[in-house]
Amino acid sequence: MRKQINQYVSWIGKTDWELKKFHGDEFTTTKGSSYNAYLIEDEKNILIDTVWLPYDREFVSNLKQEIELNKIDAIIIQHGEVDHSGALIELMKQIPNTPIYCTQNAVKSLKGQYHEEWNFKTVKTGDTLNIGKHTLTFIEAPMLHWPDTMFTYMDNEEILFSNDGFGQHLASEYLYADEVESSQLWEQALTYYANILAPFGMMVKKKIEQILAMQLPIKMICPSHGLIWRKEPKQIVQKYLEWAENYQENQITILYDTMWNSTRKMAEAIAQGIQNENEQVMIKIVNTAKEDKTEVLTQVFKSKMILLGSPTVNNGYLHSIAGILEMIKGMKLKNKKATAFGSYGWSGEAVNQIIQSLKEAGFEIVNDGIKQMWTPDEPMEKECIKFGQEIAKKL
C-alpha cells in the first residue's frame, strides 16, 4: 500500500513483520524488517528498487493499483541483491523494455542472478537523469555493502535514497524514524551497521566524506530497510562516521563455550576480577552456543576488548567458538584487544589456537591467556579473578 512522502515521492515497499532470519541464517532480525521501494511521479515516473522475491507478485499487484505499469519510464536498481531486486522478473514480464539504471557491477549481479538481457543503462558517480521538475544524481557506493551499490539523490526535494546505507531491520506501522521509540531505533541501527557494514568501515567513511564534500542539502534519507530519516537526517550520517572510526564503548565482552561448566566457571571468575579492578567498565558474558550470533557480533563491535574461552576438545576448540571466530575475522575490526582462556583435561591446545586466530583477525593480544586443568577449585578461581584484574588494567 502506498504511503505518501511528499507531492512527488511515495513509499510502495513491503513491511515484513514475520522476518526472523536474513542473509540466509547469517543475520537474526528480532524486530522484522521492511523492503523499501519508492515511486517518483514527475513528468517522468521512476521506480526506485523493488522488494524481496517472496513478495514479487504482491508487489507488482499493488504497484498496478498506484500506476499503470506502462507509465513507468525507468527503474533504478541501486543494488542487485534479491531483497532489493527480487520483483524484477515479475515486473519485467509486463514492461520488458523499460530501462533499468544501475552501476556496471549491478549489471553483472543482475544478469548473474536472473539471466535476463534487460534494457540496462549503466551509470557512475555524477551522472544525472532529468525527470521534469527534478534531476536525479547517481552516486556509486561500492562495498556499502556490495560492489554494485549506489545511492540516488533527488534535487529540490533534497532526498538521498541510500539503499543499504543508514537502514535498520525494524518493521513498523510508522514510516519515519522520529515516530518510533528512540532507544529501539538506535539499537537496531547499530546492530545493522555492526553486522552488515562494519567490514567496510574505511569505505563507509570515505564515501560519506565524498558526499559531504558534494555539499548536497539533505532533508531526508530514505534507506532500503527500516524507517526514513526526516528529522535531522544527518544524525545517522554522523553516527556512521563515529561507527566507522574503529568504534568502541567502555565494554569488555567475554565469549565462551563449555562442556562440563569448567570454562563457564572460569568466565565468571574472570568477570569478577575485572569488576573488582574497574567498576566502570561494562562486562558482557555470552555463551556462544546459546546466544544468537547477530547479538554476539554486535557486542564484539561495541567492545574495547574481548575474551574468548573454550575447553580443548579433540586437540581444538568447540565449534561455536570456531564459527564466531570466523565471523569476527570477517568484520575486519581494528583498535581492539583480546586474549583467551579455557579448561582442559589432557592436552590443552585450545587457548593458544584461539589466540592465534585472534591475531589473524587483527586484535592486539594482551597476554598469553589462561588455561586450567579439569574443574576449577577455589585456588584456581582466585587465579582467574587475578587474571581478570590484570585484564582490566590493560584497558
Image (tube, helix red, strand yellow):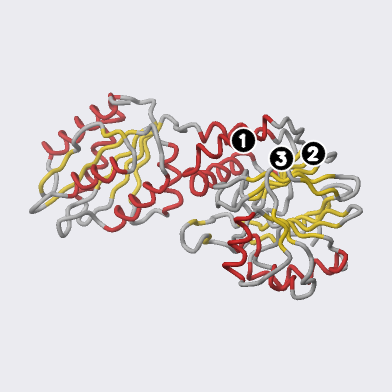
> Vertically, is 283 above or below 346?
above
Name the residue rendered at 67%, 35% in the picture. 211
Q: Mark 1 sits on what residue? A: 208
Which is nearer the eye, 388 or 325? 325
Name the residue rendered at 56%, 32% in the picture. 241
As drawn, is 364 to the left or to the right of 162?
A: left
Q: Mark 3 sits on what residue? A: 178
What is the secondary structure assignment of the residue under circle 1?
helix
Relative image position of residue 362 (x, y in whole percent): 34, 39
Q: Mark 2 sits on what residue? A: 158
Of mark 1 and mark 3, the one earlier in the sequence is 3
Q: From this viewpoint, which residue is outermost toward the bottom?
A: 93
Query: Amino acid under label 3?
Result: Asp
Of mark 2 and mark 1, the one earlier in the sequence is 2
Relative image position of residue 82 (x, y in whole percent): 60, 64
The C terminus lies in which quarter of the figure?
Answer: top left
Find the distance from the CA under tag 3 to the CA under tag 2.
18 Å
> Vertically, is 316 above or below 239?
below
The N terminus lies in which quarter of the figure?
Answer: bottom right
Relative image position of residue 104 (x, y in whole percent): 63, 55
Q: Count all numbered tags in the image, as a single digit.
A: 3
